[in-house]
């Protein structure tokens, strides 16, 4: 086995990588922007809009139902795809085939979503899309563990975070412009998913790994590659729990942002489009700016835990603004605070996750489990919000986010292995 191939399996030391892997960093801007953007644009804006068209009287409950189905499918798919990626051997490496093939499939499924004629078909396509999407996500983020030395992980993690900011918030700008033509909007997102996924893989230029030992399919292999970690994993599970709570808190609001503007703040279609676009622009600008700043600072000062904890709590602080008054400016104030927090968070979160991995040889599987936090949070958030809205109204969801995010930040601070 050559040195380059070995490091793909067990990671790269600082001595092996004296120069910043900028090319991979560029790929990790494009990649997450083009899987997360279509997903968030659909789930936060265009899917709720389509549900509202097909079943206006049950839209709040149906959004929660779609989230629950997505959670079940995506949780299994994320872990399974990560584990299968870890044991894949091809001349293009173990991550690239998954990223390319499943990016194409995700685009095709989004196109099918755009023409779904009723709620059952819409739900079925959405479920399959979740499975395919997570087979892009788990291998892509595993490249941070495979190909980035510890000295550069804060910086390259910030590249990934910038991509997430483009995807997370740029998607709102795009999707809001298609509220009057939901099908076309989803098809635009489908094209972004296909082109971006392929381009990211081409730029990353992963080396082949055909010479790596092939995994034997026995009980030990199954335990190592498909089961949750059981040793050296206290900090790993604290990071997982903190991330779940952060994403849950975020999606208490994000999952219902369309209805917050239409039903809580009583805006018309034009006002809603402008509000979502402005909010997304604020989130994107602050997210990119603070992500770009935070990553290099983390590498300089060698601190990961406190930045992740503080930025998680910031998300909850921002939620107080729309609680105070049901006016659009309060959601824009929330966007400003949340954008700063999420930008800095995205810069360092993946570096923290890599630092607490129990075993680098199962990086994609274990990172896939942590990435499961995104799925779980995106489900728990809307489910919690739906229950609160039905019992107490929209205003009560905002302090709920604050409580959830504060608890998540405190769990992160309990990590011992990382400064």
Image (spheres, grey):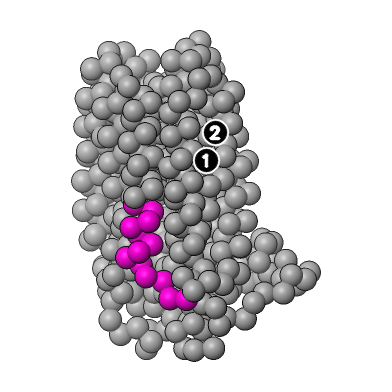
**In the picture provided, is 159 more to the left or to the right than 105?**
left
Tell me where residue 396 appears, x and y as whole percent: 45, 24
In this view, 44 is above or below 130: above
Give the dominant element type of the magenta stretch: helix, strand or loop. helix
Q: Which mark is residue 129?
A: 1
What residue is rendered at 27% in x and 71% in y?
22
Q: Which residue is more in the foreground, 179 or 75?
A: 179
What residue is rendered at 60% in x and 50% in y?
77
Asked if the magenta segment contains residue 224, the reply would be: no
Tell me where residue 99 appears, x and y as whole percent: 46, 57
In this view, 231 is above or below 78: below
Q: Which residue is more in the foreground, 115 or 268?
A: 115
Tell me where residue 193 appears, x and y as whole percent: 38, 46
What residue is rendered at 29% in x and 70% in y?
23
Residue lying at the far right of the rendered structure: 219
Give the structural element (helix, strand or loop) at label 2: helix
Q: Is residue 75 visible?
A: yes
Write the start and end of the magenta stretch as one range: 196-208
Classify the position of the N terminus by image quarter.
bottom right
Q: Residues within 10 Å of mark 1 (few under 14, many from 20)?
A: many
Q: Which mark is residue 345?
A: none
Q: Is residue 313 visible?
A: no
Q: Which mark is residue 125?
A: 2
In this view, 158 is above or below 180: below
Residue lying at the far top of the rendered structure: 57
What residue is rendered at 31% in x and 13% in y?
266
């Amino acid at each position: 086995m050559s040195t380059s191939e070995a490091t793909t399996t067990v990671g790269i030391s600082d001595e092996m990588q004296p120069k910043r892997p900028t090319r991979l960093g560029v790929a990790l801007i494009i990649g997450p922007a083009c899987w997360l953007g279509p997903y968030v644009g659909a789930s936060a804006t265009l899917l709720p809009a389509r549900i509202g068209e097909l079943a206006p009287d049950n839209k709040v409950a149906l959004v929660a139902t779609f989230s629950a189905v997505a959670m079940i499918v995506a949780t299994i798919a994320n872990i399974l795809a990560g584990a299968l990626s870890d044991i894949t051997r091809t001349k293009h490496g173990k991550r690239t085939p998954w990223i390319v093939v499943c990016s194409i499939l995700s685009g095709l499924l989004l196109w099918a979503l755009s023409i779904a004629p009723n709620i059952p078909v819409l739900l079925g396509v959405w479920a399959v899309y979740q499975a395919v999407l997570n087979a892009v996500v788990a291998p892509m983020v595993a490249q941070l563990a495979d190909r980035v030395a510890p000295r550069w992980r804060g910086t390259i993690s910030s590249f990934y975070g910038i991509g997430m900011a483009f995807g997370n918030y740029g998607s709102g700008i795009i999707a809001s412009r298609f509220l009057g033509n939901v099908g076309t909007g989803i098809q635009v997102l489908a094209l972004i998913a296909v082109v971006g996924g392929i381009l990211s893989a081409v730029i990353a230029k992963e080396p082949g790994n055909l010479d790596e030992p092939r995994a034997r399919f026995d009980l030990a292999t199954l335990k190592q590659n498909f089961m949750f970690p059981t040793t050296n994993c206290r900090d790993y599970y604290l990071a997982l729990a903190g991330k779940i709570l952060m994403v849950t808190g975020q999606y208490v609001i994000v999952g219902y942002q369309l209805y917050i503007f239409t039903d809580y703040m009583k805006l018309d279609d034009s006002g809603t489009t402008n509000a979502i676009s402005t909010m997304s622009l604020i989130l994107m600008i602050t997210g990119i700016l603070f992500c770009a700043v935070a990553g290099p600072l983390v590498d300089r000062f060698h601190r990961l835990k406190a930045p992740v904890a503080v930025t998680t709590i910031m998300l909850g602080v921002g939620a107080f603004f729309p609680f105070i008054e049901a006016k659009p400016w309060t959601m824009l104030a929330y966007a400003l605070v949340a954008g700063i927090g999420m930008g800095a968070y995205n810069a360092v979160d993946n570096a923290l996750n890599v630092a607490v991995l129990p075993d680098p040889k199962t990086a994609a599987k274990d990172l896939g489990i942590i990435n499961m936090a995104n799925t779980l949070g995106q489900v728990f958030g809307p489910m919690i919000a739906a229950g609160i809205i039905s019992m107490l109204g929209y205003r009560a969801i905002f302090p709920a986010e604050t409580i959830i995010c504060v608890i998540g930040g405190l769990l992160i601070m309990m990590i011992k292995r990382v400064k």
